[in-house]
Amino acid sequence: MSQSKKKQAPLPASSAGLLRFFEDETKGIKVRPELVIAMAAALIVISLLIRFLLPS
């Protein structure tokens, strides 16, 4: 390894900023991820039922 590489300081971890971002409390509605997935699945099922059960 060359001398110039040994003298360079290591770069900071790239995820450090992301961890700090998620520690901050924000205003707004807090929704659990499970509820979002369930609502999306329910919307898909309802739209499929409407498509296949109602004649067009």
Image (cartoon, rainbow, N blue to C red):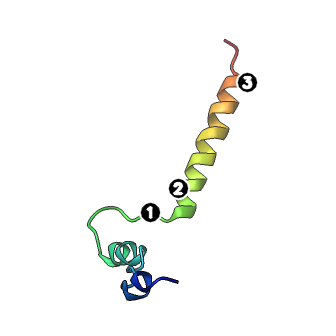
- Judge from the rendering whether residue 1 lies leftward or rightward of residue 8; answer left or right: right
Question: Badge 2, how many Cα within 10 Å: few under 14, some, many 20+?
Answer: few
Q: In the image, which disc is placed on residue 11?
A: none
Q: Which residue is denoted by mark 3 in the rendering? A: 52
Q: Which residue is denoted by mark 2 in the rendering? A: 36
Residue sitting nearer the eye, 26 or 42: 26
Question: Badge 1, how many Cα within 10 Å: few under 14, some, many 20+?
Answer: few
Residue reaching furthest top? 56
Amino acid residing under circle 3: Phe
- Residue 8 in the image: state x and y as whole percent: 37, 83
Amino acid residing under circle 2: Val
Q: Please say if the residues under marks 1 and 3 sit with CB atoms less than 8 Å apart.
A: no
Residue at 28 percent across and 69 percent down: it is: 26
Q: Is residue 45 above or below residue 51?
A: below
Q: Is residue 23 above or below residue 54?
A: below
- Residue 1 in the image: state x and y as whole percent: 52, 83
Question: Callout 3: helix, strand or loop?
Answer: helix
**Going from the N terminus, do you reach mark 1 or mark 3 first?**
1
Residue sitting nearer the eye, 41 or 23: 23
Residue sitting nearer the eye, 54 or 23: 23
Residue at 29 percent across and 62 percent down: it is: 28
Distance between the Cα atoms at labels 1 and 3? 31 Å
Residue sitting nearer the eye, 42 or 15: 15
Distance between the Cα atoms at labels 2 and 1? 7 Å
Q: Nearer the viewer, mark 2 or mark 3?
A: 2
Question: Callout 1: helix, strand or loop?
Answer: loop
- Residue 47 in the image: state x and y as whole percent: 62, 32
Amino acid residing under circle 1: Val
Q: Which residue is denoted by mark 1 in the rendering? A: 31
- Residue 25 in the image: state x and y as whole percent: 29, 74
